[in-house]
Image (tube, rainbow, N blue to C red):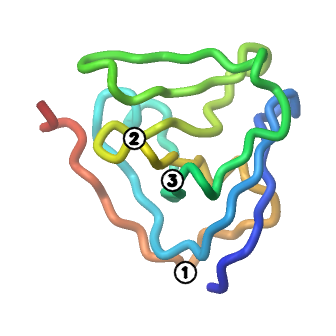
Amino acid sequence: MIEKEYFGSCHCGEVQFKIITDFPELTTCDCSICIRKNALMVKVHESHFTLIKGESFLSEYQFHTKTAHHYFCKQCGIYPFHRKRVTPDNYGINVYCLENVNPDGIPVRATVGKGMK
């Protein structure tokens, strides 16, 4: 895929953002929160992420080492993105929150978060 701009949002639309990516791969994670939210993620550098609106609608959740920052919309409860633990200058974006993105055919890598200390 060619690197381009994609727009995303939570379900109610109060949180809106854009990213730039070429979708080199998607990831899943088996840590205790990711396995429950069942998101399929694409990693983007913070310079390729822009929060367009909704900062006041974001609720942050942290656990364990309190390094990763998981964000949810306070109104609809959807998880649109998180700031990553291992690479804190990157976001994990929930591809199901992106407009006009079909993840079929993009390689998916399963990451091991459960064993992280």
Label 1 element class: loop
Q: Which mark is residue 45?
A: none
Label 2 element class: loop
* Location of residue 30 with respect to 73 vertically, above or below: below
Residue at 24 percent across and 41 percent down: it is 113
Label 3 element class: strand
Q: Amino acid at mark 1?
A: Gly
- Where does the image place residue 58, in percent across and percent down from the top left? 69, 20
Label located before the other in sequence (3 or 2): 3
Circles 2 and 1, Cβ within 8 Å, touching? The answer is no
Camera-nearest label, 1 or 3: 3
Label located before the other in sequence (1 or 3): 3
Bin the neighbour count of mark 3 within 10 Å (Cα to Cα): few under 14, some 14-19, many 20 and up. Answer: many
The C terminus - image quarter: top left
- Where does the image place residue 12, in percent across and percent down from the top left? 86, 29
Q: Amino acid at mark 2?
A: Pro
Reading the image, the residue beneath label 2 is 88
* Location of residue 35 with respect to 73 vertically, above or below: below
Q: Which mark is residue 41?
A: 3
Quadrant of residue 31 within the rendered picture: top left
- In the displayed image of the protein, which residue is found farthest to the front? 47
**In the displayed structure, does residue 113 sit left or right of residue 12?**
left
